Every structure is written in C-alpha cells, then in structure tokens.
Amino acid sequence: MSQTLETVIQQALREVVESFSERYIVDGLLKKDAIITDLDKYTPELVESILTNAILNEAFTEDIAGATILKINDIIQMLEVDEYWSNSYTRYTNKIGLATNNHYLDEMTDVVLDFPYKDTILKAGMTKDDVSKEDAEESFLNEIVAREEIDVLLDKKILKNAKKYTKDGVFEASEIQDTDNLIIKGNNLLALYSLKERFAGKVKLIYIDPPYYFLKTKPTDTFTYNSNFSLSSWLTFLKNRLSIAYQLLSYDGLLFLSMSDEGTHYLKVMMDEIFGIENFIADVTWEARSSVSSDGLFSMNSNHILVYAKNKDAIDKNDFRLALDIETFKYDDNDGRGPYRLEPFDAPNIRKNLQYEITNPNTRDIYIPPKGRCWRTTKENYERWLADNRIRFGVNGTSKPQLKAYYSEVKMAGKGKASSSIWTIQPNSITWRETNTNTSATKHQQELFGEEVFTNPKPEELIKRVLELSTNEGDLVLDFFMGSGTTAAVAHKMNRQYIGIEQMDYIETVAVERLKKVIDGEQGGISQDVAWSGGGSFIYAELMDKNATFIDAVLNSKHSDELKAIFDDMKATLDFDFRVDLQEVDQSIWDEDFEMQKKILVKIIDKNQLYHNYSEIDDETIKSQLSQSDYDFNKSFYGEK
C-alpha cells in the first residue's frame, strides 16, 4: 500500500470517528481503545458509518457469496500498529527500540507496574485543565512490561529497614514470628510475590480499595496517585495483582473489593474468570456519601463492594454472619435466662412427623402449620419446650405459638444475623447508613492528624462490618492498597493479624503514624464499639531499592540540566532495558520537551531490576548495604533461619 493511499484511508477513518464527537476523539487525539472495543462488538452505528464511507468500504470490505463482509480485524490492526495513530511518546519509544504490541485482556500476559509519584504531569486532585491531552491518553506512570521481557521481576525481594513498633517504642527487627503484623513499603505487585512463599494459602480475608477506573479524567479521586488508566491497562493492572492475591487466600478465604460504578462491571467479568463465577457471593451497595450533588443526572452516592470466595462451598453460612443486636432481644421473664426474642415456630418444608395440632393453653384455639410449612420440631420436643417455658403464644398469650430464642444461647451457638447485599439499618432503606460515610472517616482523620491527609478514606465502621462477616480473632487480613491504613487499624483493634502494602511515601507519615496512635489507644473510629484500649505491635519493612531509586530521582527532577546529571549517573551504574539504543537516546532526547525527557528516561530503565532480589543477599556488595539485623530479618522472613 502506497504512502499516499495509506494517508487517504487514515483521513477517511478520522472523518468517520470525528462524526461521533467526544465518543472517539479527545482534544484531537483518537481514543483507540474505545474505537477498537466498539469495532470488536460490531457496534451498529460505527460499522454503518464505515460501510457508507466509499474509501473505507473499498479498503476494508470483501464480497463473499453475495454478502458484504467488513474486515474488522484489519481496521483494528491498523489502529494498533500504525504510527499515524500514535502520539509523540509512542513514536519516540519506537524510534529508540521500544514498542508494545496490543492484545485483548484474555490474551494478555503483560504486567502493569505503577509509579505513583506526584509530579508536574499527574498530581493529586487534578482537574481537566491540569491534564494535557497527551497525559490523558498515555501516562508512563502506568508502565506495561511485556511477559517476554520479564525474567526476575517477580522473584522475591530483599527487605530492609525492618523495625518493630510497640507501646514501649521502636526497635530493630531481626526476625518475624508467624503472628506478627506486617507493613511493607514498595510496589504492591512485587511485594505480593515476595509474600507468596511464606503466606500462600494463609490469608483469610483480603480487603482492597484499588484505583478506580474512570471513563473520563475526574476532578478528584480516592487515590493520591493516578487512577486515570486506559481500560485495558487498568484491567491488566488489577488482573496481575488479583491473580497472585488469589494464591495467598486460604481455602475458605474471602475477598472484598471496593469499586465505583464505571469500573465494577468490567471488573466483575474479569474476577469471574480468576475466582470462578461459582465463587461470586455478592455485589454490595454502600453509601459513600450522604450529601446530594446536583452535578449530574444522578447524585452518585454509592459504591460497590464485590465479594468473592476462593471456595464458596467452604463458607459456613452460620459463620458468615454479623454480630447480634442485643436490642432485638427485648423480652425478659426475669427467670435467670436473660433477654430473648420471639421467633416463628413454623418452618419451610412439609414433613409428616412435624405436622400436628397445637392448642393455645390460654384460649384453647387450635393451630396447625400454615400451608406448605411444618412445625420446627417434633411434638415430643414441643411438649418439653412448653413445660420448660420456652414457648410463648404471642405477646399477650392469645395467638399462635412462638419460640423464645435467648441471647446467651444464640450467641454461644455462633448464630448472628445474615447480611443483606444492600446493607441497611432499616429493611426498606437503600443505603447502609450505620457504617457512616467517607465524611465521617475524614473527620476521624482530622482528629488523628489535625488535618485532612488523605482524600476520601474509608470509614472504620465499613471495614469493621467486612471483618465481622468474614473473620474471627487471630485470622490474617491483607490490604495491598493500604492508603491511610484503615484496614490495618481496624484489624488491629479487632485482634486480627494483618499485612498492609503501600508504595507511596505517606505510608510512613500517615499509615505508620496512625497505627502508632492505635497502639497508644486512640479512641476514634470503632474504638469505643470494640472497647479498644491500646497495645499490640507491628513490623515495618521496605523493599530494597535498586533501579527504583533512579525513577524517583527522574520524577522529582525540576529541569533538564538536573535530568542530564541523573542520566550520566544512570549510564554509569544502571541496568537499562536491553532493547534500548542508548546512543540514539543521548543524541535525540534533549531536543524533546522536559516532560517527554522524564517519560523516556523512566521508560528505558530495566523494570526487572527495580528492587534487589533475595537471591543476591549473600553477594558481598549487597550484603554490605544491609545491617546485620536486616540480613537476619530476611533469613527469618524467607524461612532460612
């Protein structure tokens, strides 16, 4: 195909998609993912527009047995590989030897790494004006590493700066016990793989609140770092992490995942594949805010919580219950048995030995089970319970039989109340108000730190509900999007063991500081509900940086001269991607604008070497960078001590 003809076809396709306004075009750039998705679905209006364009009809159709066949895959291939559709960043990476082929999600074996540093390209609380058209379409902060490029990326990593926090102070940690709480700073995907050897099959609950998928860039976001992934990168990003997380779950383990409307349904399809559709439990609705907004057609006040089991058949429904409300046990005969509630004496099903007449001793009225039902026990048991004063004929003694269920006995039997998938205080409500909203969590944060240090944190009451349903004391809870540390704080107060992972620097200034206050007995959140008075401990450790240090330096640089000095250091000590033509980079990169320079320098770093692998720990050069305590901690953590 000649260059002239190629240009004509490209222009024809652009004219077609431009007719759909912002559906396929943003600030002059094609939304290739959206076009490819709609082509793959044979979206009628798009297909019709292509067929009615003479140039595209001639180039991409074929007549077979009198029928016109549109060669969808040829159009998709052109969109995926054609330089014409790429922005300047993609064209540059091709020029210096780097390129990524696109695949559908079910074929995707790539890994998405995220480098969530605040910089001039992407920053917290961004508005539409903060994001350039190129940044909105392709951001190096979400780095795709093709499977064939991976050799030791997912190997277990060395941990450093291990410290144990207790009520008595902070001490170097030279070992870890099976019951220790653990906080890890570092890339969560690589940290999860480092946990695999020690914790595979041991985690009872995973709760995560990951970056949300947004069709358009949002003014605000739950996360301080970028959530504005393309759909394919976002799904791959979560698939990578959920796949290894699945391996960490125990046989009867559960996963709760918070998500917004825009991403939930894409995510559920993918999670059905990972967990098995038969292990889906519920899509819970939670009211994230109570105030009503007039910005859109609806005030979006709720979020989703997707609930999956590793093996749904292993979940005992009597264990998957909320704590009993003592207030519902409102009767007391003052006979020493304590409060009770009245439960129906009939039950579903029809069994002959449970079909008999019951006479109300007060009115002499005779009762039989309602149609299609039976009594809940035999006549012999009924007579024994009646003699033991366990049967009551309504509040006034004039109606059908009811069973007295005593609080002490129900609690001892482990029977709580079932949870609705629409968590409410009142059955007819559509919101779960008893868990509070993000607003209450923000107030708690201000009480802890004197200011709002994290946007839209989840309230402790929400996590308490999740832990109450799915865990018992001593069970292991994992949150690998730790954020402000809510999950860890609640687990600590409820006497669950926990692991938290976060790579942002605020893990030390927010999450760790919050847990220190928990150990000291802070009384916010659920503290009074669970009678929390302080105590306990946790271990903090970091993945040992290697190339990640240079990424940090590049992203925090302020001008090109600083970048040139960093690049000189990189050339002296760094492991680069093996495909990179460094001479080409050095000759051409400084003609690009500053932000492009930063993108390219991050791109050419070998992502396999972000952190030091544990296999290197006895190398003298590496060992000399570790304290004896850290060396011993690694040996303990990986079971070699």
Image: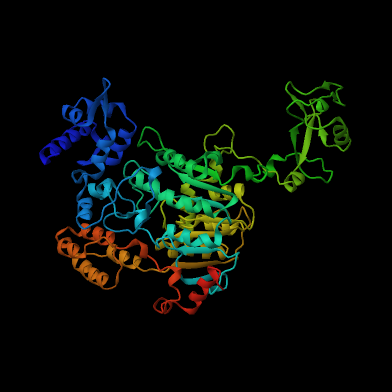
Between 44 and 426, the residue placed more toward the observer is 44
**Relative to 72, is 250 on the left or the right?**
right
Vertical position of residue 286 compared to residue 125: above or below:
above
Q: Quadrant of the N terminus?
A: top left
- Looking at the image, what colour scheme do you see? rainbow
Vertical position of residue 444 compared to residue 639: above or below:
above
Direction front: furthest residue = 65
Please say whether residue 271 is visible from this viewpoint.
yes
Q: Residue at x 41, y 41 (%)?
A: 263
Between 604 and 267, the residue placed more toward the observer is 604
Measured from the top left, where is residue 315 in percent x and y? 63, 45
Direction left: furthest residue = 4
Q: Residue at x 16, y 35 (%)?
A: 9
Please say whether residue 290 is visible from this viewpoint.
no
Q: Quadrant of the C terminus?
A: bottom right
**Relative to 360, is 329 on the left or the right?**
left
Measured from the top left, where is residue 468 in percent x and y? 61, 49
Marks counted in the figure total 0
Measured from the top left, where is residue 472 in percent x and y? 64, 53
Identify the image quadrant of residue 366. top right
Measured from the top left, where is residue 5 in percent x and y? 12, 36
**Relative to 413, is 127 on the left or the right?**
left
